[in-house]
Image (cartoon, rainbow, N blue to C red):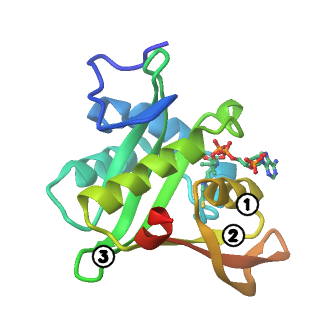
Amino acid sequence: MSNQSRPRPVIMAGERVFLSHVFAEDAPLLAQWFADLELTALLGLQGRSFTLEQEQQWIAANNADRDDQRAFAIVLRDGEQLIGTCSLFHINLLHGIAGPGIAIGNEAMWGCGYGREAVQLLVEYGFRYLNLYSIHLWVHGFNERAYRSYLRAGFREAGRLRGATLLDGRRYDRILMELTRNDQAD
Ligand SMILES: CC(C)(COP(=O)(O)OP(=O)(O)OC[C@H]1O[C@@H](n2cnc3c(N)ncnc32)[C@H](O)[C@@H]1OP(=O)(O)O)[C@@H](O)C(=O)NCCC(=O)NCCS
């Protein structure tokens, strides 16, 4: 099912998903996804619930000409359905580093390998077109699906802060994951 009014350009093509632009008209769907407290907790944004206006601003900010951030729509090739977004944050072109972020909005689509594929496309974009050297992020220990998906995408664990994440009265490790251009060449 298509959920947008204009065709999505293919920016990075994968087998089952491709990365495209996030359109202004995607804001209502994003607002539906990012209002969900379970989703925002998985993203490390515990207790946050985002409004339509915030999503509109986020999309506009991403589409502005800036060097420190790139966001993409994750689109299923089959039916061109928008299923999530992924981004490179804190892009630092001086050192060639950035942090990835990803959310597949529809829970029913979790665990199908779409996240792994989207992250691989995002990484390929960062290494090939932004000349990045290191892409790294912190994953919260309660988010095993994300941890495993990043491992599958080629990341490795670079370290962990024991008990540095607190959620609903329980402490979890905060895990640093990284992928470098050299790893990709292996
Ligand atoms: C994290 C996310 C992008 C991963 O994408 P995905 O398409 O769901 O994940 P994949 O199918 O690529 O990989 C999931 C892995 O976790 C495993 N998995 C699935 N369900 C799981 C569960 N309930 N607990 C633990 N592991 C689970 C899968 O078996 C797979 O690992 P494997 O390939 O070694 O078998 C997606 O789940 C998502 O958007 N989650 C909510 C937001 C989020 O957590 N973002 C990341 C913040 S760091």
Q: Given the image, on which type of amino acid does mark 3 rest?
A: Gly
Identified at 27% across, 19% down, the residue is 7
What crowding class fits label 3: few (fewer than 14 Cα within 10 Å), some (14-19), or many (20 or more)?
Answer: some
Residue behind mark 1: 143
Q: Quadrant of residue 165?
A: bottom right
Can residue 135 be seen here? no
Identified at 43% across, 47% down, the residue is 121
Counting from the top left corner in percent of width and height, residue 98 is at 38, 71
Q: How far apart are the two marked residues, 2 and 3, measured between alpha carbons?
A: 24 Å
Q: Given the image, on which type of amino acid does mark 2 rest?
A: His
What crowding class fits label 2: few (fewer than 14 Cα within 10 Å), some (14-19), or many (20 or more)?
Answer: many
Q: Secondary structure at mark 2?
A: strand
The single residue placed furthest to the right in the displayed view is: 170
Camera-side residue of 162 and 48: 162
Q: Earlier in the sequence, mark 2 or mark 3?
A: 3
Q: Is mark 2 within 8 Å of ligand 1?
A: yes
Counting from the top left corner in percent of width and height, residue 85 is at 45, 44
